[in-house]
């Protein structure tokens, strides 16, 4: 990539980076909003949970595991009708955010479940013995105590999502992935591919560092 | 008055029912400190979970001032749990909350307004001597300090009963003493009834007025602590005084007696009286005198000439001691 080439690519790279961040940002927020309650539900209905229920736990577990086991590339195509229903289109960045969210929710939910399971049963007992209702136990004891681990889980989820956006980009989902494939691959602009990879590395590193910092700040152990 | 009545707890397992509690009766008068002493597996934890209303007994009841709390459910159960404060062996503080936040938790759960919470938290931290640690997190505190926070938290909602589960078992001896002193002060200053569940004899002899000894899910003995200590065969007495073999002296014309005395009897020169009355020799083989909750309690194992046994026994018993022949 010559100096002249850089002038040409820089705005597009910038645009694509913002697109990737926007996709991951929106999908990330929705993932937290839906994945956290799902993770809590998995945890409290599981064996030894606050309201153990074999049926609910099995149904939720099955749905979550099916969601996690479908390869992302297939999921993207399989839920095209759903994507169209939600955002009205099947190409571009908003279309990429839908399958990304669908893939991330069960992934994050399992991490939330694991984080909640790490909370000492003694602390939950302490809360229960103070007359906490189940809702209070979840909101005031379980989730706050597990928050550092939940944040660590969210970091892992977001990093995985950044990787998935690149895959979505390859089939017209916008962002850095689309740029790398359409220009770098199809037009043999190898330099563009390398730059996108470098940007992704920086973004992932930044997310990981921010996530670690956040988790450490929240942890008072 | 806290009354535990005919409490039974049976856990069904694939290999048959396990009876953890088999008809436990314990009475704790309001404002007293009662101990429940037992080895691991005696049913202490089960009893505790039933009394703190975390577990439902299979049958029997837990009565606080005559009201049966063991059968409650829903909002009534949650309200009843608030009347019982719990102090845990492992403190069970929330790592995510500061000291003040931990103490405020029961008040928050009870829906107390923020302004009243702050005042109550300050008051409690003052009581346990941790006002300067208000903004610290539990991980920054020593075990003894964490347990003080645990006590403050348990008292926050002004419970009728403070239930302590091996509250000092994770602490070193010195810290144990200071936490026990705190509990005693809480009892004396606030008039809170305390039940201490422990396997440590010292805990019972240091702070408890009465005790129940739990063995295999039943109360093997109960009563004022000094009396239990003076009763041979109870876990309290056997732990307090040395255990000895008698074989080496028995048989050479002497008999071995165990003499226990309590209170007034401990202050009288009973052995001298026995020696004078029988004109025989009395050899002390082992023994000790302890002060338990202000009463002197003693236990001696003595060898007496076989000819003088019955007379000596009579004199000692008349003086208020308890005498048992050792085989």
Image (tube, grey):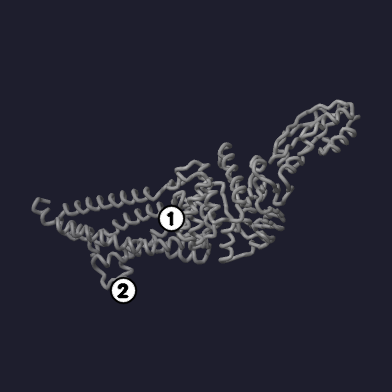
Residue linked to disc 2: A85
**Residue A198 falls left or right of residue B293:** left
Residue shown at 72% from the left, 50% from the top? B219
Q: Nearer the viewer, residue A39 or B213?
A: B213
Q: With respect to residue A202, does B312 lie above or below?
A: above
Using the rendered image of the protein, determine whether residue A204 is visible from the camera's viewpoint.
yes
Residue shown at 74% from the left, 37% from the top? B297
Q: Secondary structure at mark 2?
A: helix
**Residue B112 falls left or right of residue A24:** right
Q: Nearer the viewer, residue A199 or B4?
A: B4
Using the rendered image of the protein, determine whether residue B260 is visible from the camera's viewpoint.
no
Mark 2 crowdedness (10 Å alpha carbons): few <14, some 14-19, many ≥20: few
Residue linked to disc 1: A144
Q: Secondary structure at mark 1?
A: helix
Q: Position of residue A129 (x, y in %)?
A: 56, 56
Q: Quadrant of the N terminus of chain B?
A: bottom right
């Amino acid at each position: 990539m010559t100096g002249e080439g850089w002038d040409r690519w820089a705005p597009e790279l910038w645009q694509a980076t913002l697109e990737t961040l926007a996709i991951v940002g929106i999908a990330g927020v929705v993932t937290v909003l839906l994945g956290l309650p799902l993770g809590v539900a998995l945890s409290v209905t599981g064996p030894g949970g606050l309201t153990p229920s074999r049926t609910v736990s099995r149904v939720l577990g099955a749905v979550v595991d099916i969601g996690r086991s479908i390869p992302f590339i297939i999921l993207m195509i399989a839920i095209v009708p759903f994507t169209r229903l939600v955002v009205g289109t099947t190409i571009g960045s908003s279309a990429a955010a839908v399958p990304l969210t669908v893939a991330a929710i069960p992934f994050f939910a399992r991490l939330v479940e694991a984080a909640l399971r790490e909370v000492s049963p003694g602390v939950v007992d302490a809360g229960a013995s103070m007359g906490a209702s189940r809702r209070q136990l979840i909101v005031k004891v379980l989730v706050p105590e597990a928050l550092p681990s939940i944040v660590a889980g969210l970091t892992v989820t977001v990093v995985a999502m950044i990787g998935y956006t690149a895959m979505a980009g390859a089939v017209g989902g916008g962002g850095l992935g689309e740029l790398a494939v359409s220009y770098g691959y199809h037009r043999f602009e190898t330099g563009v591919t390398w730059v996108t990879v470098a940007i992704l590395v920086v973004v992932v590193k930044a997310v990981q560092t921010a996530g670690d910092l956040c988790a450490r700040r929240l942890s008072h152990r | 008055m806290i009354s535990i009545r005919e409490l039974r707890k049976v856990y069904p397992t694939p290999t048959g029912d396990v009876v953890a509690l088999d008809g436990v009766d314990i009475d704790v008068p309001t404002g007293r400190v009662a101990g429940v002493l037992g080895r691991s597996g005696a049913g202490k934890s089960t009893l505790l979970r039933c009394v703190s209303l975390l577990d439902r007994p299979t049958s029997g009841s837990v009565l606080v001032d005559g009201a049966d709390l063991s059968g409650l459910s829903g909002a009534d159960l949650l309200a009843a749990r608030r009347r019982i404060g719990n102090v845990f062996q492992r403190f069970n503080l929330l790592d995510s909350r500061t000291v003040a936040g931990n103490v405020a938790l029961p008040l928050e759960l009870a829906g107390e307004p923020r302004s009243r919470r702050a005042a109550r938290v300050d008051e409690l931290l003052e009581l346990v001597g941790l006002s300067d640690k208000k903004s610290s997190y539990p991980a920054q505190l020593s075990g003894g300090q964490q347990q003080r926070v645990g006590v403050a938290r348990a008292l926050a909602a002004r419970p009728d009963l403070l239930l302590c589960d091996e509250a000092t078992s994770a602490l070193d001896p010195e810290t144990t003493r200071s936490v026990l002193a705190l509990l005693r002060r809480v009892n004396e200053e606030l008039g809170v009834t305390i039940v201490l569940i422990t396997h440590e004899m010292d805990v019972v002899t240091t702070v408890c007025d009465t005790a129940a000894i739990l063995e295999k899910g039943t109360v093997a003995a109960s009563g004022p602590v000094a009396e239990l200590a003076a009763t041979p065969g109870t876990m309290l007495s056997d732990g307090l005084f040395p255990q000895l073999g008698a074989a080496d002296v028995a048989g050479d014309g002497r008999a071995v007696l165990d003499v226990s005395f309590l209170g007034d009897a401990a202050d009288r020169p009973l052995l001298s009286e026995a020696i004078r009355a029988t004109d025989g020799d009395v050899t002390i083989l082992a023994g000790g005198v302890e002060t338990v909750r202000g009463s002197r309690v003693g236990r001696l194992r003595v060898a007496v000439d076989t000819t003088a046994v019955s007379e000596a026994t009579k004199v000692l018993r008349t003086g208020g001691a308890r005498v048992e022949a050792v085989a």
